[in-house]
């Protein structure tokens, strides 16, 4: 279980915080562990406490799950939370503490722990995956930091606000052993923990650790071999009359921390004590790869994340701006708000084709599922385009197919039309195959009075 008490100390040192007894203000709307502020450190889903924030929309919503393989081949795969913009498809993980002790080194995610002389113990790191998950299969290839007494390495799925957690943990007291554990609503039950021998030193080489989590059971798997399975039906508590089984959506996370100098007797005995330190000591855990497979029945699946397996091609085309635009292909803007209309007042785009899903599902500047993806740049004749500048895809076809239009200004006065159809990926859903198309205008330039050069980035 991650001990986050260090957060309050680090948080209090930051400028501009508003202490909160219960509620926050409009300028500092998001509540986290006794403080209010804005930005991802306070407003990210699961870190932010909805019940004590300024209002019900202050905390950022859950991002949804993304089927992805992360090989940590880009420095952008992890970012300090202060610099995170909120787009989970730009950064796979955020480092949630400051100073930031997480980085990409030689194609690995590396979490470091250094000595804090003031606290007389190590200051480690925690990284959270920027997509949420509620049930699925997660595999991480890890080399632990269990090279000395007191070091704790963890691979977790956790909801910080509700307190549901599933984890693997390794301690320096015995680097050949792994602990499997789970928590329900932060109830500390030592009976939920079981230990298994790895058959090797976990700090000397990489091993594949898998959490396979469904609504009915959770399994812990080592190098393809199931160590343990807990069934939900076996967690029923007759006193509370509830199943004490972790069921809340959470985040996949990695952590390194100092258990040997924690000051808690039980924790120090568990991890080994004392943790040996010099001013130059650095302990590190390594993650070589991370694979997330979402449970399609329980997760909102974010299909806008291309993952490491996708590629794109850029296509430059000259477009005759004198051509007329078919009025039926432009996005609906009935109220002149420059955004797609919301007929049901739900705050999200409406479902025009009766498919049961939103036609513009997330407003994330990505195209929705369609057989014909159109980038429509309408003739403005000297006026500013007010059809749709939302960079999200609207739909207006109820005939079973999805006609996607996206209107984007090229210049202040002149617009053009370009339509493209391309197959990008096959998503298997209940046996049916659906084709998604994403053609996005990313840059434009004027080549002459009648034509524009438009660059399209297309997944292939």
Image: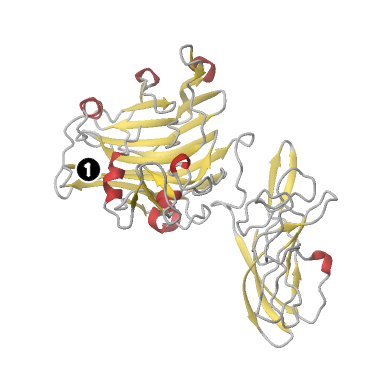
Percent across and percent down for residue 306 are 58, 53
Residue displayed at 14% across by 45% down: 278
Q: Residue farthest to the right?
A: 399
Percent across and percent down for residue 433 are 74, 43
Q: Residue farthest to the bottom?
A: 449
- Judge whether 7 appears above or below 104 on screen: above
Colour convention of the picture: secondary structure
Where, quadrant-wise, is the N terminus in this rendering?
top left
The answer to whether residue 226 is visible is: yes
- Tell me: 362 left or right of 111: right
Q: Nearer the viewer, residue 325 or 252?
A: 325
Where, quadrant-wise, is the C terminus in this rendering?
bottom right
- Judge whether 458 appears above or below 229 on screen: below
Percent across and percent down for residue 221 are 46, 28
> What secondary structure is found at the residue carrying circle 1?
strand
- Judge whether 286 appears above or below 456 on screen: above
Q: For mark 1, does the 10 Å Cα neighbourhood hold few (<14), some (14 to 19), or many (20 or more) residues?
A: many
Residue behind mark 1: 122
Residue displayed at 29% across by 47% down: 112
Percent across and percent down for residue 352 are 78, 51
Q: Residue farthest to the top?
A: 238
Q: Nearer the viewer, residue 55 or 399?
A: 55
- Judge whether 315 appears above or below 74 on screen: below
The answer to whether residue 80 is visible is: no
């Amino acid at each position: 279980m991650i001990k986050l008490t260090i957060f309050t100390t680090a948080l209090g040192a930051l400028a501009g915080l508003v202490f909160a007894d219960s509620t926050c203000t409009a300028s500092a709307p998001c509540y986290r562990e006794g403080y209010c502020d804005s930005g991802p450190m306070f407003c990210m889903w699961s870190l932010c406490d909805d019940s004590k924030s300024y209002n019900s929309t202050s905390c950022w919503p859950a991002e949804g799950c993304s089927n992805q393989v992360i090989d940590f081949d880009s420095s952008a795969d992890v970012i300090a939370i202060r610099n995170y913009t909120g787009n989970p498809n730009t950064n796979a993980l955020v480092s949630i503490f400051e100073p930031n002790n997480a980085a990409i080194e030689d194609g690995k995610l590396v979490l470091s722990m250094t000595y804090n002389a003031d606290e007389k113990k190590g200051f480690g790191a925690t990284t959270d995956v920027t997509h949420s998950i509620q049930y699925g299969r997660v595999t991480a290839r890890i080399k632990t930091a269990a090279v000395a007494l007191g070091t704790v390495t963890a691979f977790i799925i956790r909801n910080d606000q509700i307190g549901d957690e599933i984890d693997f943990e390794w301690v320096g007291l015995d680097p050949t052993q792994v602990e499997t554990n789970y928590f329900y609503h932060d109830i500390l039950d030592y009976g939920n923990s079981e230990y298994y021998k790895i058959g090797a030193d976990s700090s000397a080489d990489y091993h594949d650790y898998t959490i396979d989590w469904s609504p009915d059971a959770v399994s812990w798997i080592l190098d393809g071999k199931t160590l343990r399975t807990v069934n939900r039906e076996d967690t029923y508590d007759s006193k509370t009359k509830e199943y004490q089984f972790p069921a809340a959506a959470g985040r996949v996370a990695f952590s390194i921390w100092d258990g040997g100098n924690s000051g808690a007797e039980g924790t120090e005995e568990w991890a080994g004590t004392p943790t040996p330190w010099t001013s130059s000591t650095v302990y590190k855990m390594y993650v070589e790869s991370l694979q997330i497979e979402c449970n399609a029945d329980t997760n909102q699946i974010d299909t806008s994340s291309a993952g490491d397996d996708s590629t794109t091609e850029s296509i430059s085309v000259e477009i005759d701006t004198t051509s007329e635009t078919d009025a039926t292909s432009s996005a609906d803007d009935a109220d002149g708000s420059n955004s797609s209309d919301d007929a049901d007042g739900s705050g999200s785009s409406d479902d025009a084709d009766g498919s049961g899903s939103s036609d513009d599902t997330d407003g994330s500047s990505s195209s929705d599922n369609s057989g014909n993806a159109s980038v429509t740049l309408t003739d403005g004749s000297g006026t500013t385009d007010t059809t749709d500048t939302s960079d999200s895809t609207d739909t207006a076809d109820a005939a079973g197919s999805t006609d996607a239009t996206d209107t984007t200004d090229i210049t202040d006065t002149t617009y053009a039309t370009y339509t493209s159809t391309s197959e990008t990926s096959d998503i298997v859903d209940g046996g049916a195959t659906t084709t998604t198309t994403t053609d996005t205008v990313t840059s434009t330039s004027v080549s002459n009075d009648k034509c524009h050069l438009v660059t399209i980035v297309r997944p292939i």
